[in-house]
Image (tube, helix red, strand yellow):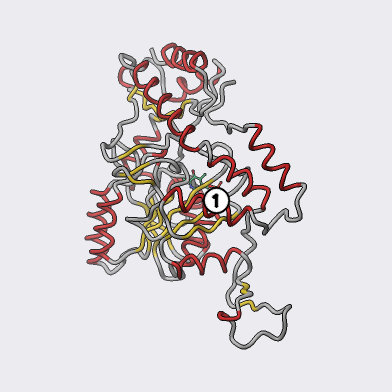
Amino acid sequence: MIPYGRQDISQADIDAVVEVLRSDFLTQGPFVPAFETEVAGYCGAQHAVAVNSATSALHIACLALGVGKGDVVWTTPITFVASANCALYCGAEVDFVDIDSRTYSLSVERLAEKLAYAEKIGQLPKVVIPVHLCGQPCEMAVIHALSRQYGFKIIEDASHAIGGRYQNEPVGNCRYSDITVFSFHPVKIITTGEGGMAVTNDGQLAKRMQLLRSHGITRDAADMTHVPDGPWYYQQVDLGFNYRMTDIQAALGLSQMHRLDEFVSKRNAIARRYDQMFSGLSVITPWQHPDSYSGWHLYVIRLQLEKIQKTHLQVFESLREQNIGVNLHYIPVHTQPYYQHMGFKPENFPEANHYYAEAISLPMYPGLTDAQQDKVVEAVREASI
Ligand SMILES: *Cc1c(COP(=O)(O)O)cnc(C)c1O
């Protein structure tokens, strides 16, 4: 089976991990801050907070921005459930903005309409979480202008997009957002096994997230309510979590960062080759906004079902039978049973449903060979007649 995504681990990555195993610190050692500094520097952000997953990063990002009971957070229905669940963890409500028919990410037109209506009924969102689906950055300049007009905060869910660029600047520089979040799950662009990071240019937000990732405990006398009782002393000043990244993970991440640009350019080359090879077939290849250079976490095709004898399910099954590990990203979050209790109806977000009825994620990772890619294209040709 050719998988849809796969990590790329070098001897240098293995050596970096082994070095940590032989050192004094398995967690909270020197590699966590080194990895944070590397990612912040790469992105052009001032602060980075490494955690044990992007899900944790999204959670503490929401908390740092003050999301709580009575607030509403908006995101896209075509994303992994974590982009929406983070608001529920904080006791807030979630609502969705339908997707753009070309990029499949949150539509800025739908966002503008929904904000105008929300202002009228007094239910503006506290935070909007655009998700850079497949690695292609959302139209952040437009979303940012709307945030100024309506007074909401922005968390970029860039779980798919490290190494990507928007208007020729790195994703994660937070020019148009308060916080950007990355995932280092093995199928993502770089990996730490499990892991995530939040980057920001706001020192106060960074400090709050550092506190929340480790129980809400501070060892800094300046942040305590009174002079320390002694050298052993720490204070819990907030209710935090254990969301820490280990030094083992950070060493792997730091080593992977050295190949980030190579990974993303390989993914771009694979995408261009798919684009060319699919011309003439009954599939829609991924459209790219001129402002974006995608990280290409995913390569999603849409079937032109009116031209194909088979159903979406039959094409999907045919590809799996031909040993192509295709997948579907994502099942619209608002249709999940857990979200049904909140009153969402499948028909609320028609563009998202339309996408779900046609989309298939094809194999996309730096180690995919030309021969494997040829096999994928041949299987799609076979399946889509
Ligand atoms: C993978 C992913 C997450 C969650 O990442 P973890 O590191 O597995 O917690 C969140 N949002 C999106 C869009 C993702 O793809």
**Disc 1 CB within 8 Å of nearest ligand 1 atom:** yes
45, 358: nearer the viewer: 45
Give above or below for 199 relative to 166: below
What residue is disc 1 on? 196
Horizontal side of 29 relative to 90 (left or right) equals: right
Instruction: Look at the image and tell me whether residue 213 can be seen.
Output: yes
327, 237: nearer the viewer: 237
Give above or below for 314 relative to 350: above
How many labels were placed on the picture?
1
Disc 1 crowd, CA 10 A, few/some/many (<14, 14-19, 20+): many
Name which quarter of the figure residue 335 lies in. top left
Horizontal side of 238 relative to 376 (left or right) equals: right
Residue 77 position, x and y percent, is: 40, 46
Q: List the single residue furthest toward the bottom.
A: 226
Q: Residue at x 36, y 35 (%)?
A: 355
Residue 99 position, x and y percent, is: 32, 43
Q: Secondary structure at mark 1?
A: strand
Q: Residue at x 73, y 78 (%)?
A: 232
Give above or below for 197 relative to 366: below
Q: Residue at x 26, y 52 (%)?
A: 141
Quadrant in which the N terminus is drawn: top right
Residue 373 position, x and y percent, is: 48, 17
Instruction: Look at the image and tell me whether residue 340 can be seen.
Output: no
Quadrant in which the C terminus is drawn: top left
Badge 1 amino acid? Gly
258, 368: nearer the viewer: 258
Residue 196 position, x and y percent, is: 55, 51
